[in-house]
Image (tube, rainbow, N blue to C red):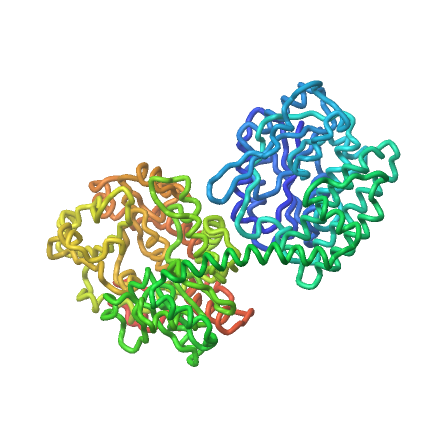
C-alpha cells in the first residue's frame, strides 16, 4: 500500500493536464499512487489520462459515465484510494518539486497527524508567482501537532481541500465526503478542521494554484449555482448542532458564513441579473437564524453590511452599492474622455461608426498583418462565396499591398475611413493574426481566429519561459485574444497548445486548416498548373527550401547555401527558395541566391501552389512541414542549429526525435541524403506516415466548408472528417505529367 494517494478530478483541462501529471510523476523520494477521475470530460482529457496510465503503473484512471461535478468526482477518487494519506490536486494545478517527499517526511516527523496543512503559491498567467498571503500562519511554532482550538487563526487560510494531506482512516472515521454543488470545499474543510484532534503544519510551498485568465474557476460563472452556498453552510451548522463539543466554533463559523455571503453579493460575475435581492433575503434569513447570542459585529464598513443583513435592508444595501459604483464610473469616464480627446479624427470617425448597426451580411478578412489575400482566411473567403453568396466579403490590406490584391476581390486600405467603417460594422471578422489594439469588439460581432501554422516553436504565454525570443506585452496580447469567438485548429496538438498559450474564452473548432483543402483535394491538373505557372515543366526535380525566422538573426541568413546546393545536385534540379515573410522582398534575399537553377519565390502569393509544384520540401523548423505533409511527399529537415534554436525560442516537441522524414545537421549531410535517395526511402516514409497521422488527421479537403457551415450558417451538423486511410492520394509531379489516368481532381 502506498503512503500517499493523489486524487486528481479531471474535467475540460486538456491544455493543462499534461503539465499537472508531469509535476506529480516527476516527484522523487516519495511512495505514492495517483487516482485520476475523468468526470466525463468532453475535450479528450480522458484519452490523455489513459496514455499516461499506459506509461506509469502508479496511475489508475476512473472514467465516469456522466458529469457529476468536482465534489462527487473527488469522492469517487477517495473511495478508490489505497494510501495512508490522501491529497486532492486540481487538474490545472501543479505540485512543486520535492513536494511529496517533504509532505511524507513531515507526516513521519509529526507522528501521523489527522491533517497536515501545507502552503501554496498562486501561479499567474503572466508569469508572476505569489505565495499565499497568510503564509505566516504556517510557521511551526509550539507543539508539532495541535487541535484547531490551539491555532484558531488557521480558519483565516483559504478554505480549500487541496492545501492539506488527510489521514485516510480519519476521513473514513469521521464520514467526510464532498457534497454536490458550488462551494463544496466549505463543509468539507470546516468539518475536517474542527473535528481533527491532531493537526500539523508544513511551512513550504507544495502546490502552485494556477490563476487562469478565463474559465479557471466555475465560481466565476454567472449562475444560480451560487445559491448552493446556502446549502453548504446549512451542512456546516447541522454538523455543529450534532456535536455539542464543537459549540465554540459557532461564532467564528458564523463570521465565515456572513463574509462568504457578502463576497458573493459583492462580486458582479456570480449572481444572474434579477437574483441579487433574492440572494440577499436568503442571506438575511440565515443571519437571523444563526447569529450567536452576544455576537459582536466587526468594526467599520464590514460591520455596517452585517447590520444591513440583520435588518434585511436590501434597498439600503443596493443604494450604497450603486453610490460606490457610480463614483468609480465617473472616474473611469473622466479618464476615458481625456484619452479620447487625444485621438485622431479617424478614431473619432471609428467611434461614430461603432454606433451604427452591424451589417449581418458583411465579413472583413485579413491575413499576416494586412499583407494580402492569403492563408486560411482566403480559403474561408472562397468557400463562403460558394455557400453564402449573399455575404459581402471585404479584405483589409495595407496601402502598399493594394496592387497585389487579386482581380475581383473587394478590399479597403488599412487606415482609411472605409477600413474603419468596415471594421466597425462587419458582423464577421476573420484573421490569421490579431487585429490592432484599437479594434473594438462589438456585441454581436463574431471574431474567427484561424492561426497560420501548426506550432513547433512556443507561442503566446508559453514564450514567457524564453525571454530571449520576445519582448511581447503579454497583457496586451491577451486583451486582443479576448476578442476571439472561434479558434480554428488543424490537429489536437494545436488545440492543446493554443488553449494553453492563449487562455481566453473562445470556442475551439477542430476542423483542419482551410488553406490545406487545395492540397488534400488536388489532382493532376492542379499539380501540372502549379509547375507550369512557375515555368517548370516535366523532367525536373524541384525542391522547395523554406527556412524559418530566427529571433537571434537580424536578416535572412539561411544556413544552407542555395546556389552551391543546386550546383552539387546537378542540372536537372531546381531549388525554390522562399524567405520568411518577416523579411519581405528585401535586397539581401536576392543576395544569397544566385545561379540559374535557384528561384526566389518569396513574393509568390500562394505558398500552397509552391507545395504542389515541389517534389520534396527542405526546411528547418518552419510550420510548412505540417502543411506539406498533407501531400505525402518527402520532407527533409536540415537542422544545423537545433540546440540554439530550441534553447532560445523553445519548442513543443523534439523535432530530431519525432521528425517528418530524414534529418541532416549540416549541409554535406543534407546533400548525401538527397544524392543517395535516402530522403525518399522506406525509413523516411515510415517517419512521414507517423507524422502525418499525428498532425494531418483533419486535413481531408473540407475544412473550409466545416468552418463556413459552423460559423456563418450556424449549422452544428458539419461534414465529418474523412478517415485518414480512405482519402485519395494526391499525385506527385511525375505522376501528374506521366499518368493520363491521374487527370482531374483526386476527390472526383
Which residue corresponds to the image point at 47% horizontal and 62% vertical from the top-left?
A: 511
Query: Is 373 drawn above or below residue 16 in the view shown?
Result: below
Left or right, 103 with reference to 683: right
Q: Residue furthest left?
A: 595
Query: Is 458 drawn above or below residue 83 in the view shown?
Result: below
Left or right, 664 with reference to 710: left
Left or right, 571 with reference to 620: left
x, y percentage for residue 456?
A: 38, 48
Residue situated in front as seen by the camera: 156 or 611: 156
Q: Would you identify the image quadrant in which residue 348 lies?
A: bottom left
Residue situated in front as seen by the camera: 292 or 555: 292
x, y percentage for residue 684?
A: 34, 48
Which residue corresponds to the image point at 19% horizontal and 55% vertical from the top-left?
A: 575
x, y percentage for residue 336?
A: 45, 59
Residue 679 visible here: no
Query: Is 741 drawn above or below residue 469 in the view shown?
Result: below
Query: Is 653 drawn above or below residue 383 in the view shown?
Result: above
Residue 151 visible here: yes
Q: Residue furthest bottom?
A: 390
Which residue corresponds to the image point at 74% horizontal and 55% vertical from the top-left?
A: 280
Residue situated in front as seen by the camera: 727 or 49: 49
Q: How many marks?
A: 0
Q: Would you identify the image quadrant in which residue 362 lies?
A: bottom left
x, y percentage for residue 605?
A: 26, 65
Quadrant location of the C terminus in the rendered image: bottom left
Quadrant location of the N terminus in the rendered image: top right
Amino acid at each position: 500500500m502506498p503512503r500517499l494517494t493523489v486524487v486528481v478530478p479531471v474535467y475540460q483541462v486538456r491544455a493543462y493536464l499534461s503539465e499537472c501529471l508531469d509535476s506529480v510523476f516527476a516527484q522523487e523520494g516519495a511512495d505514492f499512487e495517483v487516482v485520476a477521475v475523468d468526470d466525463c470530460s468532453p475535450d479528450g482529457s480522458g484519452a490523455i489520462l489513459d496514455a499516461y496510465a499506459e506509461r506509469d503503473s502508479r496511475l489508475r484512471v476512473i472514467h465516469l459515465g456522466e458529469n457529476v461535478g468536482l465534489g462527487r468526482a473527488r469522492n469517487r477518487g477517495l473511495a478508490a484510494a489505497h494510501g495512508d494519506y490522501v491529497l486532492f490536486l486540481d487538474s490545472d494545478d501543479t505540485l512543486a518539486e520535492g513536494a511529496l517527499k517533504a509532505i511524507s517526511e513531515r507526516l513521519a516527523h509529526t507522528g501521523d497527524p489527522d491533517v497536515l496543512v501545507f502552503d501554496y503559491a498562486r501561479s499567474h498567467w503572466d508569469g508572476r508567482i505569489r505565495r499565499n498571503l497568510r503564509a505566516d500562519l504556517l510557521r511551526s511554532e509550539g507543539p508539532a501537532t495541535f487541535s484547531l482550538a490551539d491555532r484558531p487563526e488557521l480558519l483565516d487560510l483559504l478554505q480549500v481541500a487541496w492545501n492539506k494531506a488527510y489521514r485516510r482512516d480519519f476521513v473514513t472515521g469521521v464520514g467526510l465526503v464532498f457534497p454536490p454543488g458550488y462551494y463544496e470545499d466549505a463543509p468539507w474543510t470546516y468539518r475536517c478542521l474542527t473535528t481533527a484532534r491532531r493537526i500539523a503544519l508544513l511551512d513550504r510551498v507544495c502546490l502552485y494554484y494556477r490563476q487562469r485568465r478565463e474559465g479557471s474557476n466555475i465560481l466565476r460563472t454567472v449562475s444560480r449555482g451560487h445559491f448552493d452556498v446556502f446549502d453548504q453552510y446549512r451542512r456546516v451548522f447541522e454538523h455543529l448542532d450534532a456535536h455539542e463539543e464543537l459549540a465554540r466554533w459557532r461564532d467564528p463559523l458564523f463570521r465565515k458564513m456572513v463574509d462568504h455571503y457578502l463576497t458573493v453579493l459583492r462580486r458582479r460575475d456570480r449572481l444572474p441579473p434579477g437574483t441579487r435581492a433574492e440572494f440577499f433575503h436568503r442571506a438575511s434569513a440565515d443571519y437571523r437564524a444563526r447569529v450567536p447570542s452576544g455576537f459582536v459585529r466587526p468594526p467599520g464598513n464590514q460591520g455596517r453590511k452585517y447590520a444591513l443583513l440583520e435588518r434585511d435592508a436590501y434597498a439600503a444595501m443596493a443604494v450604497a452599492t450603486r453610490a460606490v459604483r457610480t463614483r468609480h464610473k465617473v472616474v473611469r469616464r473622466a479618464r476615458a474622455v481625456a484619452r479620447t480627446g487625444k485621438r485622431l479624427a479617424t478614431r473619432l470617425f471609428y467611434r461614430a461608426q461603432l454606433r451604427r448597426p452591424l451589417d449581418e451580411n458583411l465579413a472583413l478578412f485579413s491575413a499576416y498583418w494586412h499583407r494580402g489575400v492569403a492563408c486560411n482566411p482566403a480559403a474561408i473567403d472562397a468557400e463562403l462565396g460558394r455557400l453564402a453568396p449573399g455575404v459581402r466579403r471585404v479584405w483589409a490590406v495595407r496601402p502598399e499591398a493594394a496592387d497585389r490584391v487579386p482581380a475581383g476581390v473587394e478590399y479597403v486600405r488599412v487606415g482609411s475611413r472605409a477600413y474603419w467603417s468596415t471594421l466597425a460594422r462587419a458582423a464577421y471578422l476573420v484573421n490569421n493574426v490579431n487585429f490592432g489594439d484599437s479594434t473594438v469588439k462589438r456585441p454581436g460581432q463574431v471574431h474567427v481566429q484561424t492561426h497560420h501554422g501548426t506550432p513547433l516553436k512556443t507561442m503566446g504565454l508559453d514564450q514567457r519561459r524564453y525571454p530571449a525570443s520576445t519582448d511581447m506585452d503579454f497583457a496586451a496580447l491577451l486583451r486582443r485574444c479576448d476578442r476571439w469567438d472561434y479558434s480554428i485548429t488543424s490537429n489536437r496538438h494545436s488545440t492543446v497548445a493554443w488553449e494553453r498559450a492563449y487562455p481566453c474564452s473562445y470556442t475551439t473548432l477542430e476542423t483542419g486548416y482551410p488553406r490545406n483543402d487545395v492540397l488534400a483535394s488536388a489532382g493532376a491538373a492542379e499539380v501540372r498548373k502549379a509547375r507550369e505557372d512557375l515555368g517548370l515543366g516535366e523532367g525536373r526535380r524541384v525542391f522547395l527550401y523554406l527556412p524559418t525566422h530566427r529571433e537571434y538573426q537580424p536578416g535572412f541568413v539561411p544556413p544552407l547555401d542555395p546556389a552551391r546546393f543546386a550546383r552539387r545536385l546537378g542540372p536537372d534540379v531546381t531549388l525554390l527558395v522562399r524567405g520568411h515573410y518577416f523579411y519581405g522582398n528585401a535586397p539581401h534575399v536576392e543576395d544569397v541566391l544566385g545561379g540559374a537553377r535557384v528561384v526566389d519565390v518569396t513574393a509568390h502569393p500562394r505558398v500552397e501552389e509552391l507545395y504542389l509544384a515541389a517534389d520534396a520540401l527542405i526546411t528547418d523548423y518552419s510550420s510548412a512541414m505540417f502543411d506539406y505533409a498533407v501531400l505525402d511527399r518527402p520532407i527533409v529537415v536540415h537542422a544545423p542549429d537545433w540546440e540554439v534554436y530550441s534553447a532560445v525560442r523553445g519548442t513543443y516537441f523534439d523535432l530530431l526525435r519525432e521528425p517528418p522524414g530524414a534529418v541532416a545537421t549540416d549541409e554535406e549531410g543534407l546533400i548525401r541524403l538527397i544524392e543517395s535517395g535516402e530522403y525518399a526511402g522506406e525509413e523516411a516514409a515510415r517517419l512521414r506516415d507517423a507524422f502525418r497521422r499525428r498532425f494531418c488527421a483533419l486535413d481531408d479537403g473540407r475544412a473550409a466548408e466545416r468552418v463556413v457551415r459552423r460559423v456563418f450558417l450556424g449549422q452544428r451538423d458539419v461534414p465529418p472528417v474523412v478517415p485518414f486511410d480512405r482519402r485519395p492520394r494526391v499525385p506527385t509531379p511525375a505522376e501528374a505529367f506521366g499518368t493520363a489516368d491521374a487527370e482531374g481532381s483526386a476527390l472526383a
